[in-house]
Amino acid sequence: MPTYGYRRVHALLRQQAELEGWPLPNHKRVWRVMKAHNLLLTRHVGGVERRHDGRVAVEARNTRWCSDGFEIACDNGERVRVAFTLDCCDREAITYVGTTGGITSEHVRDMMVEAVERRFGLVNRLPSAIEWLSDNGSCYVARETQRFASSLGMLPRTTPLQSPQSNGMAEAFVRTFKRDYARVRPCPDA
């Protein structure tokens, strides 16, 4: 029981007491006994704070694009899932896709093609490499998506796990969109 806190130990002792017909233990007494024998767990105070000194924004257009997704709840209970592509220089929303199902890697690949066509016209490959920054969602880290991005001339980059601030520009866009549009406009259904 080295990873059991006093609450869990108390619950186990209470279950055992009920089965055996013993008097129920007091949770404060369990805490005192565990403290006396140095068995209490150390309090969890959060993860290690990491420095975030990198920059998402860039100085020139078409050098880094970021992508993310979010969900909007409708009045009738349906949900609309939206994914988008932003330019990290001018913060322009280049492309987006919306669906009532999940965002798939096919949706992401379609967004990549549409973004390239909107910025460069009908080309088979980008004239210079563009970083594609996204989180670690399954649609972004799928092998097909990674290969497709590379074949277009993109450099797929994912944020570190549990670090949404590394894709801060996309996260800020989501907050702004939800605050300024999704929460103030009626959305009866998908």
Image: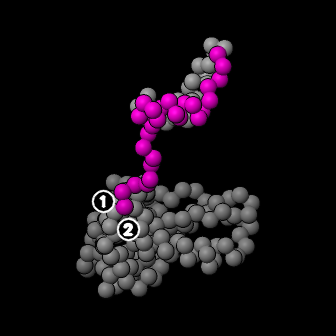
Q: Name the element at disc 1.
A: helix
Percent from the top left, x then y, of residue 48? 36, 57
Q: Nearer the viewer, residue 20 or 182?
A: 20
Q: CA distance from mark 1 to mark 2?
A: 23 Å
Q: Is residue 33 left or right of residue 113?
A: right
Q: Give the residue type that dot 1 points to.
A: Arg
Q: Earlier in the sequence, mark 1 or mark 2?
A: 1
Q: Residue at x 42, y 30 (%)?
A: 37
- The answer to which image quadrant residue 10 occupies is top right
In the image, the segment drawn in magenta is 22-49
In magenta stretch: residue 45 = yes
Q: Give the residue type that dot 2 points to.
A: Ser
Q: Residue furthest left?
A: 128
Indicate whether 89 appears above or below 170: below
Q: Name the element at disc 2.
A: helix
Q: Nearer the viewer, residue 170 or 96?
A: 170
Percent from the top left, x then y, of residue 99? 58, 63
Indicate whether 149 appears above or below 173: above
- The answer to which image quadrant residue 55 occupies is bottom left
In magenta stretch: residue 186 = no
Q: Using the rendered image of the protein, determine whether residue 131 is visible from the camera's viewpoint.
A: yes
Q: Nearer the viewer, residue 9 or 72?
A: 9
* Residue on which the image places disc 2: 166
- The answer to which image quadrant residue 65 occupies is bottom left
Q: Quadrant of the N terminus?
A: top left
Residue 147 has which mark?
Answer: 1
Task: Name the front one of labels 1 and 2.
Answer: 2
